[in-house]
Amino acid sequence: MKILLAGRISEVAELTGFIAPISSTADIHALIFGKPGEDEIRSLSVSKAIVAENADPSYADDVVEALKAVLGKEVYDYIVLVATRINKEAGARVAQTIGAPAITEAIGVRLEDGSPVFIRSVMAGKAISKETLSSPAVIMVAPGRNKPVDTGKRVGEIQRISISGKRSVEIIERKGKERKGVRVEDAEIIVSVGRGFKSKEDLSMAFKLAELIGAQVGCSRPIAADLKWLSEEHWIGLSGKKVRPKLYIAIGISGQPQHLAGIMDSKIIVAINKDPGAPIFKYSDYGVVEDLYVFIPKLMEKLSTRQK
Amino acid sequence: MNIAVLVKLSVDTSYMRLDQNNRVLFSEIPLKVSDIDRNAVEEALRIKQQGLANKISSFSVLTWGSSDKRVSEAQNLLREILAMGVDESYLYVDPGFVYSHLYTAKILARMIRKAGDYSLILAGEASIDGYSSQVPCRVAEELGIPCVSYARRIEVKEGKVIVERDLEDSVEVVGVKLPAVVSVTREINTPRLPTLLQIRAAMRKPVNIIKASDIGLEPMKKIHEFVAEGVKIQRKGVIIEGKTVDEKIEKLLEALAKEGITLYRG
Ligand SMILES: Cc1cc2nc3c(=O)[nH]c(=O)nc-3n(C[C@H](O)[C@H](O)[C@H](O)COP(=O)(O)OP(=O)(O)OC[C@H]3O[C@@H](n4cnc5c(N)ncnc54)[C@H](O)[C@@H]3O)c2cc1C
Ligand SMILES: Nc1ncnc2c1ncn2[C@@H]1O[C@H](COP(=O)(O)O)[C@@H](O)[C@H]1O
């Protein structure tokens, strides 16, 4: 089996963690974009590194051109990328060109009877799909879930290629998004807010509670996407962040499947909602039917007296 | 200029059905127009209202079964988007269809080419059942034209399309020459709800059924197989009862303490 990991050097390192369960008998190569130092390249646990120095991975066109150049010379069973938005474009295009199947947001892989079976979530998180793809295939891995792993391979050969850099998409302007360094993905406790909050100002209650219990604040899609009361770093769900805290406290969130899709891996889920019929209660460990405007201040009062 | 919209008839994730072995019964779940594709339709209508497009056609490949029942279900759903203002629909029906994004994209590209001249092809960022974000750029590759995804604003100008696209760490304004494929996000607009009159009028608009022989497609191979299993809810589902808020809070904290979680930092 031959596997090609492609991306920025940090992404390639992350991908070694994803493919670890299938890497023992595989030949693993890397296609690296940008100009990493020789030491950095040699620290990757792959047997061959191909460096496309003049490819800018923030352009799907560059990723596609570099991949096509490599795939034109060598055949790989699996071409593996991190599923960033740009890479999803590039991966889909490369797969179509080589007539290959692809999967997006793979969350795991294992060997079954000698062939890799990839795992992903479907049906808005209500089902887990086990997928087998004829090779060659393009695999796009859910970002941020894997850490670099030593697969036992050492870089034997470093090859350099260059691309023409012809692009179909012209970037007119690029604005960075506001980032406050919130990482709900890593949080042990999350206080998550939904449309049950009547105004942006009221969210300060949730932040105070979060501070008191050492939690991060998360939110449902409408809070970040429609109302824009919080930045997208807080957004949890199918189209947002997937979280795995010890404790997830959903306040004023109804529990639609697209939200639940992001919180499946939480250890304990607590829901506060004033509607006893809210679906979130069926998907929680503990539910309290209460008005959040009554509940949160009372809870904070209790916690601060206990703390003293 | 004509606009093509890719509309997937997804299975409705709120009506999941499972067999005895906990496997998802895709063929028995009702269909719906994939949510974000309604935003793509709405955007096409807005461009037409600005006087920038003549005709809007929708293209669908029926993926979850091709029985008569499925076909009429699909036709009824397509009437909803015809009622929104789409001029005509094309629906690919094929008992030999083998699930795969590769073939879906090949079929869509061929249908579009055969149906006419389309400068802008709009799609959703992802379909609600599979959520794979593959088909739009695959169609673009098949047609040999550019692809821009995650659009939250679109402007058609002098043979070009200017797109504000939403990436993880940045918002980019990009320009591409037409023809091009653009996939949109849910934030781009709010899809209109057709009136009763429009729904009635839509009965007269065409839903053209396309078969494999119409587009000369070679037989499909099984290249992508999957088994989907329902995620079992293993939550306790305990509702904390109590006469007062204080009582409920006490009981909640007690329950959490038993789970090994203390909320106050000691
Ligand atoms: C393609 C697609 C992708 C999506 N992705 C996501 C995603 O990633 N994340 C996500 O969250 N959603 C996502 N959604 C949207 C999702 O379907 C729901 O619309 C959304 O999760 C609802 O948010 P909510 O629970 O905050 O609001 P609502 O559904 O409006 O619920 C508000 C809740 O607050 C309760 N409430 C009101 N007042 C009070 C009070 N005073 N005290 C206590 N409770 C109160 C109400 O009883 C209600 O249950 C997606 C949808 C689609 C179609
Ligand atoms: N079977 C299909 N028929 C028509 N359009 C489709 C089909 N599958 C996907 N699409 C389009 O491609 C987008 C992304 O779908 P997906 O790649 O399945 O996530 C959808 O929102 C549709 O616009």
Image: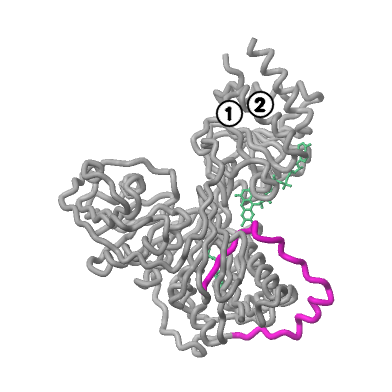
Q: Secondary structure at mark 2?
A: helix
Residue range of the region highlighted in magenta in the rendering? B180-209
Q: Is residue B20 visible?
A: no
Where is B141 relative to B185, above or below? below
Kindly indicate whether the residue at mark 1 contacts the one at mark 2 (C-beta within 8 angstroms). yes
Q: Is A270 left, or right, of B211 in this rendering?
A: right
Tell which circle, 2 or 1, labels the residue nearer the N-terminal end: 2
What residue is shown at x 38% (from left), y 58% (from top)?
A: A139
Where does label 2 land, which residue? A209
Pick whichever, A36 or B199, lies toward us. Answer: A36
What percent of the width, then of the height, locates residue A121?
A: 50, 53
What residue is shown at x 37% (from left), y 69% (from top)?
A: A100
Where is B247 relative to A290, above or below? above
Pick whichever, B79 or B180, lies toward us. Answer: B180
Q: Residues within 10 Å of mark 2 (few under 14, many from 20)?
A: many
Three-letter residue code for mark 2: Leu
What residue is shown at x 15% (from left), y 50% (from top)?
A: A156
* Residue B225: quarter of image: bottom left
Instruction: Tell which subunit mark 2 falls on.
Output: A
Q: Secondary structure at mark 1?
A: loop
Three-letter residue code for mark 1: Ala
Q: Are marks 2 and 1 on the same chain?
A: yes
How many numbered tags mark residues here?
Answer: 2
Q: Is A25 left, or right, of B66 in this rendering?
A: left
What percent of the width, then of the height, locates residue A59?
A: 42, 59
Where does label 1 land, which residue? A215
* Residue A264: quarter of image: top right
The mark found on residue A176 in the picture is none
Q: Quadrant of the N terminus of chain A?
A: bottom left
What percent of the width, then of the height, locates residue A117?
A: 37, 56
Task: Give the farthest residue toward the left.
Answer: A156
Mark 1 CB lies closer than 8 A to ligand 1 = no
